[in-house]
Image (cartoon, rainbow, N blue to C red):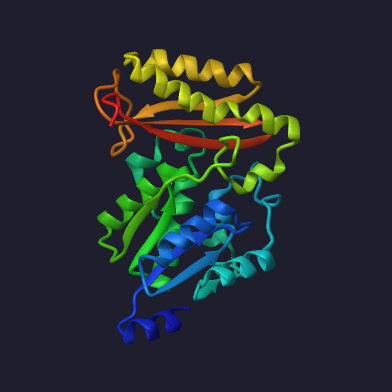
Amino acid sequence: MRAWTRARRAQGETIAFVPTMGYLHEGHLSLIRGALSLADHVVASIYVNPSQFAPHEDFETYPRDTERDLSALESLGCSAVFVPDTLYGQGGAPAQRAWIEVSELSAPLCGASRPHFFRGVATVVAKLFHIVEPDTAVFGDKDFQQRRVIERMVEDLDLPVRIVGLPIVREPDGLAMSSRNVRLSSEERLRARAVPQSLELAERLISAGELDVDAVRRQVRSHIESAGGEVDYVAIVDPDSLQTPDRVSGPVRVAVAATFGGVRLIDNRPVDPRGA
């Protein structure tokens, strides 16, 4: 992979990179399309990273369909796809001794209930950056905290990669596109619409002048729970630091994580009380 990339760059061509865990949906494909406008070549990776799953999580059942993914990537004009069997050597992820941790940005939101997660994400993305050596890497804003962690890692470690974030792509019913959506039953899928609806509720409340963060969070949580969702967190955070203010005084990111039928869903929405 590295030899292929270096040969392209030796010819003065640029590389945009889209890392994925496969089972691609329209959200992933929108990242590929966006990347095509940013560089001469687009490289995608397909790798279900074991180090970001805890033992009780869904690594073994995470959906996979590599042949379908490769066909979709080829049809869009992706120049190369990196599909490693493992990125952790013969001992697998448990044998990894050097890890990257982005402490402050990894602690809130998903990091509170999944303390292992962002260490695994940062480490595997750093590995992929060193292998692919892209000029630009593209990430979707559904995983907003992940993008912020990677941006901070790139900044602090002086990695020569420009990070570009692209908007969330949604299903017609408003649900953020996710590889895990296929595991929802039809009834669970109907109830899960409460997740994007709760973000719209937060935006309406803030736009109407409700600036107390706890008051907004309570109503968002109640909306999800009334639909049968088990809430992991409801957060209203500064989009840069991911810290929670007492009151909304400028642009914020409203983020939620909730489980329906054993399927964990995350979503977020930028909200500006000034209506910008």
- Position of 119 relative to 263 (above/below): below
Residue at 63% in and 24% down = 229
- Position of 68 relative to 228 (above/below): below
Residue at 43% in and 79% down = 2
- Whether residue 97 is visible here, answered yes or no, is no
Image quadrant in which the C terminus is located = top left
| Residue 47, horizontal then vertical, whole percent | 57, 62
224 on left or right of 106: right
- Position of 245 relative to 143 (above/below): above
Q: What is the residue that sits farthest to the front in this orientation?
A: 172
- Position of 47 relative to 102 (above/below): below
Say which of 217 and 115 sits in front.
217
Q: Quadrant of residue 91?
A: bottom right
Say which of 273 and 134 sits in front.
273
| Residue 30, horizontal then vertical, whole percent | 49, 56
| Residue 134, horizontal then vertical, whole percent | 37, 70
Say which of 51 and 130 sits in front.
130
179 on left or right of 76: right
- Whether residue 214 is visible here, answered yes or no, is yes
Residue at 57% in and 37% down = 175
Q: Quadrant of residue 192?
A: top right
Say which of 261 and 159 sits in front.
261
204 on left or right of 84: left
| Residue 150, horizontal then vertical, whole percent | 37, 52
Residue at 35% in and 43% down = 103
